């Protein structure tokens, strides 16, 4: 999945970034896990995902991944709502989506 930039954030503060990567960001949705990179590459099984939310601003469409065992979030700016909906549609049905994320997927269809 092409991404513009990735960020490490804090749950409940979607526009605050603790770290950022716009040189070599990674968001990869594999069959069993999420692979991502902000400072270093990480892998998380889908069961670790507490919720996926979205935020949109001019020229930005962020996917916000919250995890059960962490206050920090992984945020991926995928650039457009269409690309965001495409990424969300790749997630397995058991991954919880916020109302905004569900609406983003529904708007695509």
Image (cartoon, rainbow, N blue to C red):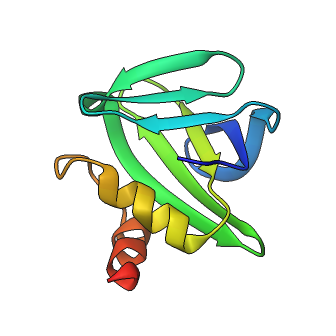
Q: Is residue 43 above or below residue 58?
A: above
Residue, far front: 2
Q: Is residue 97 visible?
A: no
Compared with 8, 77 (above or below) is below
Provide residue 109's location: percent of width, then percent of height.
32, 83
Occupied quadrant, residue 104? bottom left
Residue 107 in the image, given as x and y percentages of width and height: 39, 84
For image coordinates 57% across by 49% down, the residue present is: 12
Seen in the picture, residue 85 relative to 71 is either above or below; the reply is below
User: Does residue 103 appear in the picture of this structure?
Assistant: yes
So how many labels did they put on this image?
0
Residue at far left of view: 94
Residue for point 47% across, 43% down:
65
Look at the picture and state if 61 lies above or below 37: below
Q: Residue furthest right?
A: 23
Quarter location, residue 72: top right
Q: Residue at x 30, y 49 (%)?
A: 91
Residue that appears at 25% across and 33% down:
31
Image coordinates for residue 38, horizontal then vertical, percent: 68, 27
- Left or right relative to 23: residue 52: left
């Amino acid at each position: 999945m092409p991404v513009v930039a990735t960020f490490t954030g804090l749950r409940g503060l979607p526009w605050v970034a603790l770290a950022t990567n716009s040189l070599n960001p990674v968001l990869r949705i594999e069959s069993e896990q999420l692979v991502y990179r902000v400072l270093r590459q990480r892998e998380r099984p889908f069961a670790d995902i507490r919720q996926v939310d979205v935020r949109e601003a001019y020229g930005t469409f962020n996917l916000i991944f919250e995890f059960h065992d962490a206050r920090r979030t992984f945020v991926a700016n995928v650039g457009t709502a269409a690309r965001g909906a495409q990424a969300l549609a790749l997630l397995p049905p058991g991954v919880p989506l916020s109302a905004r994320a569900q609406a983003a997927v529904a708007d695509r269809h």
